Image (cartoon, rainbow, N blue to C red):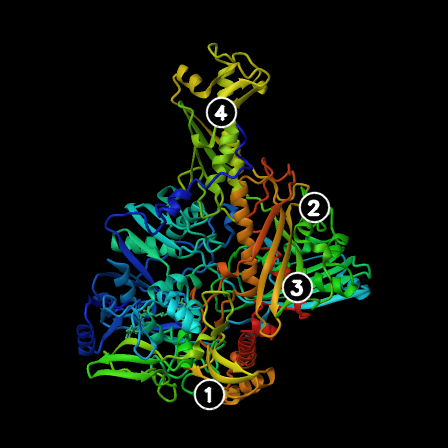
């Protein structure tokens, strides 16, 4: 039996998905269901002065119209903490419809509950609201002078500023300097499934919520605080989730609103956000600007890095996606300064968006590196190699594993990098200017804080159920967990069923920060291994077992049969042992205690990105012709799903580079393109030839299976490689994303 | 969506009778514009009359050698029709470059001509928009207007006409056949689309309940050497930033026949007559193409974010004409 881990097992939920049989949160059958629709503020700042709901209340099928005047109060709004922490994790510390103040465009101001979603939606348009409008800040340019440096960002997990050495002195003494400012349009996640919550009060104080989330437990804990109930009164179920990319990583207001509305009407209530509401209800990647100053010696060795970020946050929270972390450790640089500057504006609190921070921060650094290479006159890849750091430049500790130089090398081979003529505008193909570019990719290995748990139960027919409270939002985690459990138990994958998606199951953290598979995978691995050990222990202690008195260390399991390692003919199956000993099942709870973040190693995932673009010489149209991404994500559980994650990430980077931008109209304080017809993401026709490869690194530090995660590293560096390729093709540096054609006319 | 009543009719007379009798009614063809706009409350009819069963889905030969596209012919069917592909390639190309395969399978050619603008303020019922709510002002004039028009604009409205195929039809002098309470009409396509002027809410000369039954393509040998060039942000499923429909004949290095229209840059599918005048009889070279483009764009008016479209259109016109001339020259 060859190991399942590292293979290409098809997705265990694949059949159900393609047949339309997977049940998403808005599809769970519930009797006596009512539908809620949220009405959003059309202004970005001010106060509700009058609200007339009478016509809406009279509309056909309407059960209730709830506003700040009659919606139940929330008990407490928990503090903002990333859901990786395993506790309550609200997306922002503001809960709407508690008073008459409007803080941002799209803020919920009313909820209509009706017998059908169409009637609820229509009645919502019959509510008359009068506002007193006050001036709003929705663009960085409106409020640069009001910027401040926060003490901490990211829910308090990261410092607002950091430094080492003396960056001012080092820059003054540098032989070469690159100083550049990069601007980034806001981005939205746009998962295919809009967020949805179905709230069912089974009893006065027992609530079940079917919710589309990256973390059922995070929803449970957040609802407990908001509703003032103990966690035992709340069950959160998330059977299938249609993508998230960070929009469902934190807990936003809609599950609690669904619960409050359901309590109000005394019926189960389903609340589904519209596509347009997805642009104002679950955060986004904030508008931002980053300034990089690189100082180097004439040979390219970096002596100083100064990295400042200016971004827009909400009135409530000091949120900035952590753009400075990975760049600060990407290369040896003895002198460093990183500072976040925030401007408060009229926006929902921004949030995690796939590769939160790295996608923008590494873009800035890697474009500046390209400029530095040109300035010094060396190959961009050579510049990276000269600045490769074998230890974490921040702490001086060794990397738990790296593989970065191997990634460069492999990518260069696959791409044919070494034939490159460094001169810009040196290649043409008809009307197309051809260019190539590269970038490094870095993504932190973030460890969960709380213990991760999974339960493994073996039945006496030799099949096993393994459970943990993780949800499947398209990453393939249920498939990978099936493989992990099968290998640890020594049985084929067909005999394992992985069950997740409920807060009643053993607690794991929300699957965020590319850490979902490693967090739950470690727990599953431990649970299944301990279950196997328990059966071996019983066998060697059983007088009737062929393995009696054997040394457990000498017993292994092959295809469900426990055998002596050196005499595989001696042994018995799990099923034989369990039947003989009248054991219907055996069950074990596995707990993985993650190592502390500073366990003596620098922990990061590395990779290399290369891209070839064609730019229409006259018309400015940019088309990406091919991309190569090579990553060192530690142990790969499933090559097929990992490959998909990495490739999808690279295409995200393509979208970030060329297409994705949410446009704010500052006069209205609203997004002007809140639809998938107007917010452009790449389509198949834009997708180039994408080559994905991985470099094996062995990592004993991060977790028992040595996994570092594949969910986001594919995004990092992809946009920079494309922008650098655009420069190589055209001779024009790009300092603003997305690179639309008018910038190249 | 506001509650509606819905009926499905099987003959043209009933369709026209039902809609013209009720001012709050609308035809429903593929629904890809109509239902979309009802969902966001931009259009709020009380009654939808589904015309998909009407026998107007075919592409037929006309006695004069032209071709009639049934008003309810699907975009995808017309794009694959051999007579269209052979005799009017720019029509097939414009159709295939529009929307997505799923939309083209639903959408009809009459519905395509009747589609509404993509201006985000038109689609946002809380924003001022003269086209949607006359007299409320044009939010796009100094708003997010990267996609807006530079030709045919007025101070009341600068929204781009979004259709691709209409651009090719305008170049070909197609004729829109209609039937309404007052009988049948043949409307030259250039008269079918109205400039916004002071009344941007009026987009076409149809009366309420008047049905587009077909679109006639005249017999035009030059149309066999035609193409549609569309420049857009992404490679598929996206409206034009600039588009050119061109049909051209070249003999002895000179342009003997030219039909040219622009899309993505004007408030109606834009017949480039000024450019045609420059090109007619001129040498088929870059100089003529540039002069023609400049003549056409002399009246272009930029509005903030869309200023680049003038230069983009100039270059796209030169590109399309040069490629066409080269193909003609080597043919
Ligand atoms: C996301 C998206 C992208 C798109 N991209 C493009 C693009 O790139 N290029 C492009 O050209 N188009 C594009 N379209 C527009 C699409 O082509 C039109 O929506 C479609 O052609 C409309 O046809 P329909 O049959 O669906 O019309 P409907 O939506 O059914 O009707 C549209 C309007 O026409 C009226 N109507 C319909 N048929 C008749 C008739 N026979 N006589 C009189 N009135 C009639 C209806 O009452 C309604 O007012 C896009 C649409 C979407 C949603
Ligand atoms: S451009 Fe036309 S459609 Fe757009 S807001 Fe102005 S009036 Fe309305």
Disc nearer the start of the sequence (4/3): 3
Q: Nearer the viewer, residue A259 or A409?
A: A409
Q: CA distance from mark 4 to mark 2?
A: 36 Å
Label 1 chain ID: B
Q: Is residue A224 left or right of residue A417?
A: left
Answer yes or no: do the residues labelled 2 and 1 have beta carbons within 8 Å?
Answer: no
Q: Is residue A498 above or below residue A542?
A: below
- The reply to whether label 2 and label 3 mark residues of one chain is yes
- For disc 1, the neighbor class at 10 Å (few under 14, some 14 to 19, many from 20) is some
At 59% from the left edge and 38% from the top edge, which residue is drawn? A703
Q: Quadrant of residue B57?
A: bottom left
Residue A559 image label: 4
Q: In which quadrant is the C terminus of chain A drawn? A: bottom right
Residue A435 image label: 3
Q: Position of residue A112 (x, y in %)?
A: 29, 62
Pick out the residue farthest to the front: B252
Q: Which residue is mark 2?
A: A406
Disc nearer the start of the sequence (4/2): 2
Give the number of the mark in front: 4 or 3.
3
Q: CA distance from mark 4 to mark 1?
A: 79 Å
- The reply to whether label 2 and label 1 mark residues of one chain is no
- The reply to whether label 4 and label 1 mark residues of one chain is no
Answer yes or no: do the residues labelled 1 and 3 have beta carbons within 8 Å?
Answer: no
Q: Is residue A620 left or right of residue B135?
A: right
Answer yes or no: do the residues labelled 2 and 3 have beta carbons within 8 Å?
Answer: no
Callout 4: SS? loop
Residue A613 seen in the figure? yes
Callout 2: SS? helix
Give the number of the mark in front: 4 or 1.
1
Residue B273 image label: 1
Q: Nearer the viewer, residue B127 or A609?
A: A609
């Amino acid at each position: 039996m060859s190991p399942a881990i590292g293979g290409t097992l098809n997705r265990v939920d694949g059949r159900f998905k393609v047949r339309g049989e997977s049940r998403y949160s808005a599809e769970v059958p519930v009797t006596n269901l009512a539908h809620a629709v949220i009405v959003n503020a059309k202004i970005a700042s001010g106060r509700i002065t009058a609200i007339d709901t009478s016509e809406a209340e009279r509309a056909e099928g309407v059960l209730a119209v709830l506003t700040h005047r009659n919606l139940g109060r929330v008990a407490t709004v928990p503090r903002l903490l990333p859901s990786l922490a395993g506790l309550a994790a609200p997306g922002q510390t503001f809960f709407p419809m508690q008073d008459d103040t409007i803080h941002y465009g799209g803020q919920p101001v009313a909820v209509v509950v009706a017998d059908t979603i169409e009637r609820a939606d229509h009645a919502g348009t019959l509510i008359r609201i009068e506002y007193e409008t006050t001036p709003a800040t929705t663009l960085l340019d409106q409020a640069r002078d009001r910027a401040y440096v926060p003490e901490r960002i990211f829910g308090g997990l990261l410092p607002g500023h950091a430094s080492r050495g003396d960056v001012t002195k080092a820059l003054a003494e540098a032989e070469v300097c690159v100083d550049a400012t990069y601007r980034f349009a806001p981005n939205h996640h746009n998962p295919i499934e809009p967020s949805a919550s179905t709230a069912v009060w089974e009893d006065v104080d027992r609530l079940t919520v079917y919710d589309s989330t990256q973390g059922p437990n995070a929803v449970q804990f957040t609802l407990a605080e908001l509703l003032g109930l103990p966690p035992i009164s709340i069950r959160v179920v998330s059977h299938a989730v249609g993508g998230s990319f960070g929009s469902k990583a934190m807990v936003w207001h809609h599950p609690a609103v669904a619960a409050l509305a359901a309590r109000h009407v005394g019926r189960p209530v389903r609340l589904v956000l519209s596509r347009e509401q997805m642009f104002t209800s679950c955060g986004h990647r904030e508008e931002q600007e980053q300034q990089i100053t690189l100082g180097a010696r004439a040979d390219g060795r970096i002596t100083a890095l100064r990295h400042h970020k200016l971004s827009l946050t909400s009135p409530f929270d000091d949120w900035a996606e952590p753009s400075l972390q990975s760049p600060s450790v990407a290369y040896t640089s003895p002198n460093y300064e990183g500072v976040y500057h925030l401007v408060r504006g009229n926006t929902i609190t921004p949030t995690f968006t796939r590769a939160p921070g790295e996608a923008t921060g590494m873009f800035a650094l890697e474009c500046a590196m390209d400029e530095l290479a040109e300035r010094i006159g060396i190959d961009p890849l050579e510049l990276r190699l000269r600045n490769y750091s074998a230890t974490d430049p921040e702490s001086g500790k060794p990397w738990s594993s790296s593989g970065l130089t191997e990634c460069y090398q492999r990518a260069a081979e696959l791409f044919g990098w070494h034939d490159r003529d460094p001169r810009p505008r040196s290649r043409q193909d008809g009307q197309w200017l051809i260019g190539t570019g590269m970038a490094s990719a870095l993504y932190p290995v973030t460890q969960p804080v709380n213990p991760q748990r999974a339960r493994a139960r073996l039945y006496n027919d030799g099949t096993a159920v393994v459970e943990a409270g993780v949800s499947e939002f398209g990453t393939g985690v249920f498939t990978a967990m099936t493989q992990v459990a099968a290998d640890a138990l020594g049985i084929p994958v067909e005999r394992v069923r992985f069950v997740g998606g409920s807060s009643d199951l053993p607690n794991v953290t929300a699957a965020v920060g590319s850490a979902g598979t490693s967090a739950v995978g470690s727990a599953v691995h431990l649970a299944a291994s301990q279950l196997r050990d328990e059966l071996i222990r019983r066998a060697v202690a059983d007088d009737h077992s062929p393995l009696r008195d054997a040394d457990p260390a000498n017993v292994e399991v092959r295809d469900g049969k426990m055998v002596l390692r050196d005499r595989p003919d001696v042994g018995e199956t799990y099923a034989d042992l369990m039947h003989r000993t009248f054991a219907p099942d055996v069950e074990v709870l596995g707990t993985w205690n993650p190592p502390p973040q500073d366990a003596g190693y620098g922990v990061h995932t590395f990779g290399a990105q290369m891209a070839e673009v064609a730019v229409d010489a006259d018309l400015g149209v940019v088309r990406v012709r091919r991309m190569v991404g090579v990553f060192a994500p530690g142990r790969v559980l499933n090559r097929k799903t990992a490959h998909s994650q990495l490739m999808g990430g690279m295409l995200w980077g393509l979208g970030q580079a060329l297409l994705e931008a949410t446009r704010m109209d500052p006069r209205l304080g609203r997004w002007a393109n809140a639809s998938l017809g107007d917010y452009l993401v790449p389509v198949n026709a834009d997708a180039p030839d994408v080559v994905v490869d991985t470099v094996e690194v062995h990592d004993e530090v991060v977790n028992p299976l040595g996994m570092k995660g594949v969910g986001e590293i594919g995004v990092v560096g992809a946009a920079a490689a494309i922008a650098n390729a655009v420069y190589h093709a055209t001779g024009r540096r790009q300092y603003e994303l997305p690179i639309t054609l008018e910038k190249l006319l | 969506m506001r509650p509606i009543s819905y009926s499905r009719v099987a003959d043209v007379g009933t369709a026209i009778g039902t809609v013209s009798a009720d001012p709050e009614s609308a035809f429903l063809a593929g629904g890809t514009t109509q239902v979309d706009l009802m969902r966001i409350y931009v259009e709020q009819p009380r009654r939808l009359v589904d015309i998909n069963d009407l026998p107007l889905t075919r592409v037929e030969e006309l006695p004069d050698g032209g071709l009639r596209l049934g008003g309810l012919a699907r975009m995808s069917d017309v794009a694959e029709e051999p007579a269209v592909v052979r005799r009017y390639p720019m029509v097939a190309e414009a159709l295939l470059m529009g929307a997505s395969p799923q939309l083209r399978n639903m959408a009809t050619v009459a519905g395509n001509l009747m589609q509404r603008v993509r201006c985000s303020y038109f689609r946002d019922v809380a924003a001022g928009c003269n086209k949607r709510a006359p007299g409320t002002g044009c939010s796009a004039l100094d708003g997010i207007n990267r996609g807006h028009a530079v030709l045919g604009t007025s101070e009341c409205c600068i929204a781009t006409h979004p259709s691709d195929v209409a651009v090719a039809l305008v170049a070909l002098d197609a004729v829109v056949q209609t039937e309404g309470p007052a009988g049948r009409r043949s409307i030259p396509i250039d008269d079918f689309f109205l400039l916004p002027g002071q009344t941007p809410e009026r987009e076409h000369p149809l009366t309420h309940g008047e049905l587009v039954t077909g679109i006639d393509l005249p017999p035009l040998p030059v149309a066999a050497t035609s193409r549609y060039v569309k420049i857009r942000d992404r490679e598929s499923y996206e409206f034009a930033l600039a588009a050119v429909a061109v049909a051209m004949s070249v003999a002895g290095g000179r342009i003997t026949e030219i039909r040219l229209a622009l899309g993505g840059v004007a408030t109606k599918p834009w017949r480039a007559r000024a450019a045609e005048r420059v090109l007619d009889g001129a040498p088929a070279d870059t100089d003529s193409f540039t002069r023609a483009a400049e003549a056409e764009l002399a009246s272009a008016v930029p509005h903030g974010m869309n200023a680049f479209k003038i230069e983009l259109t100039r270059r796209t016109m030169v590109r399309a004409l040069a490629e066409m001339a080269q193909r003609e020259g080597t043919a």
